[in-house]
Amino acid sequence: MDVLKFIIATLVYILIAAFLSWLFYSWKRRDLLGGFLGGMVVAFFGSILGGFVVSDTVNFLIDFLQRGFYIANVNVIAGLIGGYAAIYIFNKINHDRPRRDY
């Protein structure tokens, strides 16, 4: 049963990473190193890191939202904050260049 929870939590983090990568790559049209998949990898690790760090530090601020935004032991709000911060920094490292269509 613990393996199933781990798989579901990993899938939730992958969905968060895919959403954030799509946000920067397609909607905001920013050039990311590695394209969509590179942004997804960075957002995945950022959402995991944010899920651990932000979840504990600002738990008192989002306590009333956690009941509705906890999916398979994943604090989605903390994952979104961490993933967005990671891909934002990744975008700034790439000098915030707009994506060119070839």
Image (tube, helix red, strand yellow):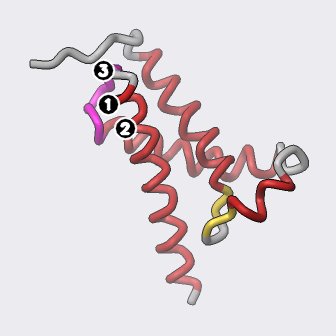
Q: Are marks 3 and 2 in contact (CB under 8 Å)?
A: no
Q: Are marks 2 and 1 in contact (CB under 8 Å)?
A: yes
Q: Viewed as shown, does residue 68 lie left or right of 79?
A: right
Query: For the residue carrying disc 2, how many other residues have a C-alpha within 10 Å: few (<14), some (14-19), or many (20+)?
Result: some
Q: Mark 2 points at which residue?
A: 22
Query: For the residue carrying disc 1, how many other residues have a C-alpha within 10 Å: few (<14), some (14-19), or many (20+)?
Result: some
Q: Mark 3 points at which residue?
A: 31
Amino acid type, residue under disc 1 in the picture: Ser
Disc 3 to disc 2, C-alpha distance: 11 Å
The residue that appears at 64% across and 39% down in the rendered structure is: 81
Please name whichever residue, 88 or 100, is drawn nearer the observer in this view of the structure: 100
* Residues shaded magenta: 30-37
Q: Viewed as shown, does residue 23 lie left or right of 70?
A: left
Expressed as whole percent of the image width and height from the top left, the position of residue 61 reads: 87, 44
Expressed as whole percent of the image width and height from the top left, the position of residue 57 reads: 83, 44
Query: For the residue carrying disc 3, how many other residues have a C-alpha within 10 Å: few (<14), some (14-19), or many (20+)?
Result: many
Q: Please report whichever mark, 3 or 2, sits nearer to the chain's N-terminal start.
A: 2
Q: Which of marks 3 and 2 is in front?
A: 2
Disc 2 to disc 1, C-alpha distance: 5 Å
Q: Quadrant of the N terminus?
A: bottom right
Is 34 magenta? The answer is yes
Amino acid type, residue under disc 3 in the picture: Asp
Q: Name the residue under label 1.
A: 26
User: Outermost residue, bottom direction?
Assistant: 1
Q: What element carries label 3?
A: loop
The residue that appears at 64% across and 44% down in the rendered structure is: 50
Disc 1 to disc 3, C-alpha distance: 9 Å
Q: Is mark 1 on a helix, strand or loop?
A: helix
Answer with the quarter of the image where residue 102 lies.
top left
Is 31 magenta? The answer is yes
Expressed as whole percent of the image width and height from the top left, the position of residue 82 reads: 61, 40
Answer with the quarter of the image where residue 97 lies.
top left
